[in-house]
Amino acid sequence: MVDGEEQPPGLCRIFLNTEGEYTRSVRICVELFARGVTDSPDERPGPDDMDARLWMDINEHGFHDERGMHHPPLPRYVPMHPDTAPGSRPDTIVFSSRDIEVTTTGVFHFTAAFSADALPFQDPAKQWVTVNQLSHNQDGVLVVSPLTVQECPSIAEVCIRKYGASVKDGVFRSGRIKNLSEDLENIPAEVIYLLPFFVPGTGDSYTGEDVRKGALGSIYAVKDFFSIDPDLITPPEETDIPGLVSLGLITEQDMNQLLTGEQQNELRFVNDLASRTLEELVQLLGRDTITQLIGRAEMRWLVDKAHGLDKRIIFDLVLMQTSRDCPLIDRHIDWYALDENGRPRKHKIAWLDYSDVALFDLKFNKPLQNYLSGVAPYWISVCDFDGVRIDAAQTVDRPFLKQIKNRINAVKADAIVLGETLCAMNEAADVTTDMIYTLLVDHHVHTTNAHAYFNIFEEIHAQFSRGTVGMAYFENHDSARATRIWHESFHEHMQREPALFHYWASQAAHALPAPSLENMWDVAYYPALLKNIMSSVVNCCAGTSDHVRLAYAFEMGADYGEEQRTDFESDTLLYPHLRAQTPHNLLHAAYVSLAKLKNRHTVLHQGRVWYLRNSEPGGDPDDRLMAWVKYDEARTVIAACNLDVSSAHKGSFRLHFAPLARNASYRLRFLYDSYAELNALHTVKMRVNYTGADLMDDGISLLLPPISTLVIDIAPAQ
């Protein structure tokens, strides 16, 4: 029970306001089946014949010993008492704990144990049998997340290496932290998720070979988890170090962690940095240390600016591997999975071959896990990051996953822990991060059938525990750009059907430059942009509060229709400046509108859902019109998408389930119209005045043009 509301057994998710005094109350109940103990009904055991207690670690994060090793919390026992509430099934005994106040975020476990001997409850000799010794029950799991996660924040994935990168005289210059900071307000997302920013490695310590992938090497080939890649940092010669000191962006913590004892004797206070010339600092500290001081300062500036814009910054926590020249290989070869030659194995997962990295032997390797679980708390304490994304979270043993989240929450209670889950849904159902991935990439890119969408949504709701928040996206750094795929597909379609080219050229008359309207390739880009924003609208509002909520996410550049892959291993460039050019600026503005829509109308991500399958009377026989309703006690909203690039589709949908009054009058209005957002010629029309009886019995008739998206508010008429 959570605040008096019954929750299903197994993994339970609750959300906590970490900024106030508000707490959540849980009560653990267990039902013991007692038939067959004796043949005599009068001699069957009852609640007076046994004792029950609850083992739990709720509100406990564990501790560190003098060696820095992390240990799980010590067990606590809470008495359980017979529960005589009506409704219990025959031959069962129900025990309940007292109400337990949940006061902090984290991952916690609990289980019940029973004893039927005559010893007193607190006697250490008393014999206890746990539930999972009696049956197949697992320990109960309570995942406590910050309340902000329940708000389904939008997420933008960003590779700093590519943000503001350039090529001069054939030489690639990496993007920098400063470039991202300067452009932060133009990213229409509430959370910025940074791909790894650690010092990468490029070689093999055994062979001396350069094993980097591509021209640049992989940012997931981490050489040093506790240093920032110097290529992402403004060079010292271009940096106002006294200015950073005056802004408090270089701290005493930095001095203690980065300077040797001798250096600290020379530079005792942060302000001493401002009194020395760069040449003096280089001589005293070395260029590498100065660069790291600047890097930390620039990361803090990034995070501070994000907070000022009501955004949060999380970063990628790499757990599976290091570079092949990482110093840990020499220090802790026992931390690695070894090949037949006794050298670290290369990493392969699914179809991906990470030949430039050394694979950890991570599972149940406690010294290694202790080391890795300290990485995120370190950077959160240093730069005030707002959380992490855990790489390949489904491969991590669950006690370690718990350790990671609890160590993070011990440092920052409102930190977001996002778990990547590239696996079958049933393998991710017990991932105890605050948010998980919902794998909709292929569905968005290749699916034009509404039933296929609804089937995957309903499978998601069936597989995951109530309260799960799933990050939904249509492309990421491992995939080809979806916009490019749609662009090529629609171009091929226009080549087969010239009339389709003329239709889209007319729709794009106000969106594309005049010369582009004569070019089939340029025209095909326009519906690709409509498909792009359609996918994010779906990801924003197709979840449901009674099962799995969805939080929409996008890869860096998706908001302006980037077609070049992020491909951080290569020296290709991305082009954020396109955001200011037509038609890219229209798509970017559509993303800005979507962000505002989400914040104004919480029913879109907090309400319940009803999927309007087209098999209903009056539905679209081609199954290309996808519509669903989001509703709560106060509001009803209908969303609809035409998945067809070549034809308009009409559907009629009855809202017999919606919280509407039959005799009341309602007025419909567009909250979002993708054609209008991208300046299409076509104007969608609809009937605007209905009675509740009309909506429930006859329904709403919608005629949607190709690749269009509508969100319609149904509000009481004034």
Image: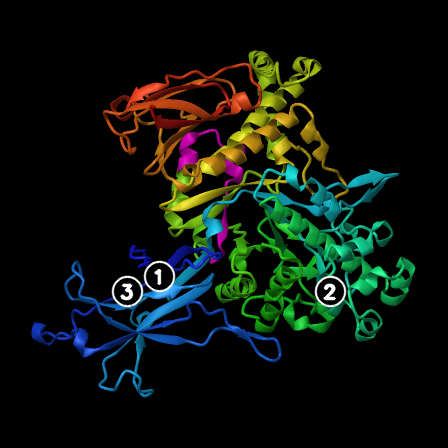
Of tags 1 and 3, the one toward the viewer is 1
Q: Position of residue 216 (x, y in %)?
A: 77, 48
Q: Is mark 3 on a helix, strand or loop?
A: strand
Residue at the spot 75% in from the left edge and 41% down from the top edge: 164
* Residue corresponding to mark 2: 254
Q: Which mark is residue 29?
A: 3
Who is closer to the viewer here, 670 or 393? 670
Q: Are marks 2 and 3 in contact (CB under 8 Å)?
A: no
| Mark 2 or 3, nearer chain start | 3
The crowding category of the residue bearing disc 3, from other C-alpha atoms within 10 Å (few below 14, some 14 to 19, many at least 20), is many
Who is closer to the viewer here, 202 or 103? 103
The crowding category of the residue bearing disc 2, from other C-alpha atoms within 10 Å (few below 14, some 14 to 19, many at least 20), is some
* Residue corresponding to mark 1: 25
Q: How far apart are the alpha carbons under marks 1 and 3? A: 13 Å
Quarter residue 293 falls in: bottom right
Q: Is residue 119 left or right of residue 382?
A: left
Of tags 2 and 3, the one toward the viewer is 2
Q: Position of residue 170 (x, y in %)?
A: 86, 39
**Depicted 9 relative to depicted 178: above or below:** below
Q: Where is residue 539 in the image (x, y as percent from the top left)?
A: 49, 38
Question: Which quadrant of the rendered structure holds the C terminus?
Answer: top left
Q: Is residue 685 magenta?
A: no
The image's colour scheme reads rainbow
The residue range painted magenta reads: 432-454
Specify whether residue 137 is in view: no
Who is closer to the viewer here, 302 or 430? 302
Q: How many marks?
A: 3
Residue at the spot 55% in from the left edge and 26% down from the top edge: 530
Q: How far apart are the alpha carbons under marks 2 and 3? A: 49 Å
Please, what is the three-letter code of the amino acid marked with disc 2? Asp
Please, what is the three-letter code of the amino acid marked with disc 1? Ser
Q: Where is residue 657 in the image (x, y as percent from the top left)?
A: 28, 33
